[in-house]
Amino acid sequence: MIDRRTFVGSAAAFVAGGMLRPEAGAATRPSGAPVRLPLGFSTLGCPKWDWLTAIDFAASHGFAAIELRGIQDTVDLTKRPEFQPDRLAQTRRELTDRGLVVSDLGASTNLHETDSAKRDAGLAEARGFIDLASTLKVPYVRVFGNKFLPDVPREETLVRVAATLRMLGEYAKARNVVVLLETHGDFTDSPTVLEIIHRADSTGTAVLWDAHHTFAFGKESPETSARALGPYIRHVHLKDSVPDGDDRRYVLTGKGDVPVQRQVDALVRIKYAGFYNFEWEKRWHPEIEEPEVAFPQFADVVGGYLRAAGIKAR
C-alpha cells in the first residue's frame, strides 16, 4: 500500500478530471501494478471464500479493487485475523503483490436507529471500521441511513440521520477517511439523499451510489441520479435484476431490466473517478449464481461497457 500523501496526491492520476474533492482521496493501484480496468467486486458475493481465495480470484480475473463486506462467517471485519495489528503488514503485502487495493469497507451501521442500545452498537461498529480503514489506508467506509420508522416523523428521522452522519464524518475526517451514505433502504431517491448530505455539511461525508436501488426502488433514471448525486459520488454498486412479485430477483449482468450500461455511461459523463464495483448479494441470496460464474461475467460485460465509453485500462 502507498502512504497517505501519495494516496491523496495520485488521485488525479487515476482518472484525470474526476469528481473527487481534494480531501476525499481515492484508492489507486500500487505503483508497478498490472494495467487493469477500474473494476471491483464486493466480498458480499463470495461468502464462502477465505481472504486469499478472494484476492487471488480478483487478481487473476482482471479486477483492480476489492470491497470488503465480511469474509466467510465474519461480517465484522475488525474481528478477522487478517486485520489484527500483528497481521496487517502481511495483509498489505498480499494486496500489493497482487496489484490490488481495497476500495472501501462496508459497515452495517444504520443511522435511523432510535433504540439507544442499537444506536450505540452501530456507532461503535462504524468507528471501529473507520479506525481499520485509516490503518489500512482505505479511503471509505459505507453506512446506511436505512429506514423511515412508521411511528417517527420524517423530519425527526432526517435530523437524526444527518446529525449522526456528520458526527461520523468528522471522526473519519480526522483519520483521513470519508464516510459514505449508501442509496439504500428508504433512502433511494436523490432529493432525500442530497438533503441528508447537505444537512450533514461535512467534507468527511459523501455518497455511495447503489445504481440498482435508485433505479429499481427510487424510480430514477441513471442520468437523473448521476447528475444529482455526481459531486458526492465516491463509490458505486452495480448489479442487475428482474421484477419478482413485489420485489426483485438478481440476475447476471445484462440479463435483467436494470440499465447497467446507461449507469456506466452516466458515470463516465460526470468523470467519476472511482471503481465500478459489482455487489452480488450472494450472502443474503444464496440461490443466485456462484461467484465463480457471476464475477467474471460482470468483468466481461461491464469491461465492455467501459471500453465502449472510452475508458482504458490503467
Image (cartoon, rainbow, N blue to C red):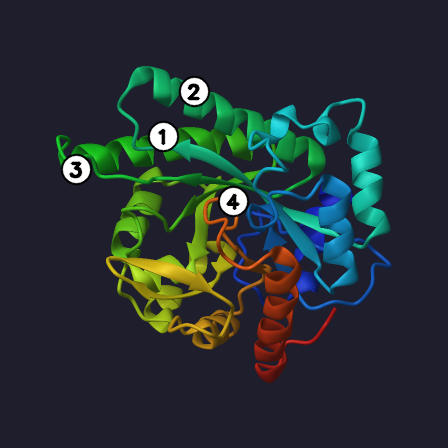
Q: Rounded to the nearest whole Å, what is the CA distance between mark 2 and mark 1?
A: 13 Å
Q: Is residue 229 visible?
A: no
Closer mark to the observer between disc 4 and disc 2: 4
Residue 36 placement (x, y as % from top left): 74, 67
- The residue tagged 3 is 155
Task: Tell me which residue sits at (32%, 31%) in the image.
Answer: 163
Task: State which tag comes first along the sequence, 2 or 1.
Answer: 2
Q: Are marks 4 and 2 in contact (CB under 8 Å)?
A: no
Residue at x 78% of width, y 30% of height = 88
What residue is disc 1 on? 164
The local crowd at label 4, few if under 14, some if 14 to 19, many if 20 or more residues have their Cα within 10 Å, is some
Per the image, the residue denoted by label 4 is 283
Tell me which label, 4 or 2, sits earlier in the chain. 2
From the viewer's perspective, is the residue at label 1 or at label 4 nearer? 4
Q: Which label's residue is closer to the chain start, 1 or 4?
A: 1
Residue found 73% across the figure and 26% down from its top: 81
Q: Quadrant of the N terminus?
A: top right
Among the two numbered marks 3 and 4 on one chain, the one whose residue lies closer to the N terminus: 3
Under circle 4, the secondary element is loop
View extreme (top): residue: 117
Question: Which of the marked residues, 3 or 2, is nearer the chain's N terminus?
Answer: 2
Location of the C terminus by quadrant is: bottom right
CB under 8 Å between discs 3 and 4: no
* CA gap, disc 3 and disc 2: 23 Å
Single out the residue that lies furthest toward the front: 287
